[in-house]
Amino acid sequence: MNTSPKFRPLIKKLLPEYLTLIILALFLCLSANLRFFQKVLDIYPWASNQGFICSLVLLLFACLLFFAALFSVVLSVRVTAVIFLLVAASSAHFSDSFGTVIDSDMLRNVLETNVAESADLLNPSLGLRLLLLGFLPALFIWRFSASGTGFISSALKNGLISIITLGIAAACIAGFSSQYASFFREHKPVRYYINPAYPIYSAINLGASFIPKGPPRPFQALQAQANIVEEQEAHSELIVLVIGETARADHFSLNGYERETNPQLAKQDRLISYSNIQSCGTATAISVPCMFSYSTHANFDLKSARNTENGLDLLKSAGVNVLWRDNNSDSKGVADRVEYENFRSPGLNPICDSECRDIGMLGGLQEYVDGHSGDTLIVLHQMGSHGPAYFARYPKEFEKFTPSCRSAELSECSQQEVINAYDNTILYTDYFLSQVIRFLESNSSRYETAMFYVSDHGESLGESGIYLHGMPYGFAPRAQTHVPVLAWVGASSDIDYEQSKLLKDTANTHDAVFDTLMTIFEVTTSLLPTSAAQLVILKPEEEEEVASVPH
């Protein structure tokens, strides 16, 4: 775009810094906050709240102008505009398409995801929005706005703008004080949709969490004791723990779902389906480390957990063979100190078509068991029902519920088509788990066998316009936190099946995973209080030989 030099001063005069900021804030208010205004109108219908809603639009404009003015003191108006526009365009796409809230946990998920998972979310709609509402407006502002007048001058001008916007905000609130009091007190989650203010705030908050506060803490080892199985004893433990991905409890027919999504598991005699389990988080990056941490959900801290031994470390220290096989992104740090195998490529996974299948994680597993003596825990981390490309998560022969959504852009499908594709992923998980049980049954004559299945979090399938997962936990819908948990108990196991079955409707959380593993392998740590977060009850034992675990 070659503008004649004689016109450039005129253009710059038309777009001084303050006018550029005003245009930017107005554009963002009108183009990037559709989901915010939808949420507002759900609470305050237009017909009876026209004055309040108009004041809210003005308040949003003032807030966006205020933050843009503050940022432009440090970054310049041009750089601020580019950042705000690109963040707003991308955030608005996911907010409008999936109901996503871009908070610190969601951004952490983005940083930890792999290329294949990211590819599911890239589509022409995102590209078009970035072009029309991000790159082109950014290019316009960069080309036709003033280049700045120096730090002191810019700080004074933007300081004045900030004062004016605060006055506008105060006038808006004063004019409808009773409604704003209710809005701020009763509807706090709506603020998470203010775009791009909240995504940028979340990014700053996440970045700050990586800055060390004081000297680095030494890695914390947990003191543990364990019952050691003697060589001459007939049976050792062979436990398979399957970490599910994105499965929700109310789509398991074992829990009363009207569709038969668990036909294979329904045939199992010694299976327990726990109907009242809440996840630790709404994203894998939180839930997986949390379920293996000695900390409870109430006091779990991700940064602390990464600097502390977890349940797998304790079991390894107790002499248990621990193997983690992953067909998902990774273990989120949980398996950093135990044997780990990545099954996302054909190099290890023998069953790959359009993508490598969960069932491939069973390949060569018998050889691993035969090559190790003593107690063994095998963790299988599924790709499961990971969205939005549900249709890619299962082989063609599991296309039972039709018509199914064949696109990762869920807005192209009806809600029922999305549900059909999702239910097919649960059907494939049912088959996978039945094969895990079959594997364990073939080893029940030599081992005390059991399988546990725990989904990391649930999934929204279009209810209230929300898709996928990752909502802030405090107001996440139950579909994202109510997770399926199963236990299959082998006939040779020392788990009391009948007594454990009595716990199936007990309210519990992901805390039960750590406590149950410690119970089964009879490992204790002085840092753990006596906990009731159990999934199983063991048969009484006459004697236990307790030995200290060296560190």
Image (cartoon, helix red, strand yellow):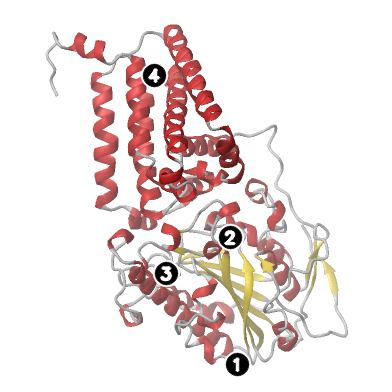
Helix or strand or loop: what does disc 4 sit on? loop
Residue that appears at 58% across and 89% down: 441
In the rendered image, residue 279, in percent from the top left (x then y), is placed at 60, 63
Give 409 or 164, whichever is nearer the viewer. 164
Q: Amino acid at mark 3?
A: Leu
Sequence-first tag of 2 and 1 = 1
Residue corresponding to mark 2? 288
Would you say residue 334 is visible in this rendering?
Answer: no
Residue corresponding to mark 3? 348
Q: CA distance from mark 2 to mark 1?
A: 29 Å
Q: Residue furthest front?
A: 48
Task: Bin the neighbour count of mark 4 within 10 Å (Cα to Cα): few under 14, some 14-19, many 20 and up.
Answer: many
Q: CA distance from mark 4 to mark 1?
A: 67 Å
Lateral position of residue 69 relative to residue 205, left or right? left
Would you say residue 9 is visible in this rendering?
Answer: yes
Sequence-first tag of 4 and 3 = 4
92 above or below 150? below
Q: Which is more foreground, mark 4 or mark 2?
A: 4
Asked if marks 4 and 2 touch (Cβ < 8 Å), the reply is: no
Q: Amino acid at mark 2?
A: Val
Q: Amino acid at mark 4?
A: Ser
Q: CA distance from mark 4 to mark 2?
A: 41 Å
Helix or strand or loop: what does disc 2 sit on? helix
Task: Bin the neighbour count of mark 1 within 10 Å (Cα to Cα): few under 14, some 14-19, many 20 and up.
Answer: few
Residue 269, numbered label: 1
Give 345 or 188, whichever is nearer the viewer. 188
Sequence-first tag of 4 and 1 = 4
Lateral position of residue 484 relative to residue 262, left or right? right
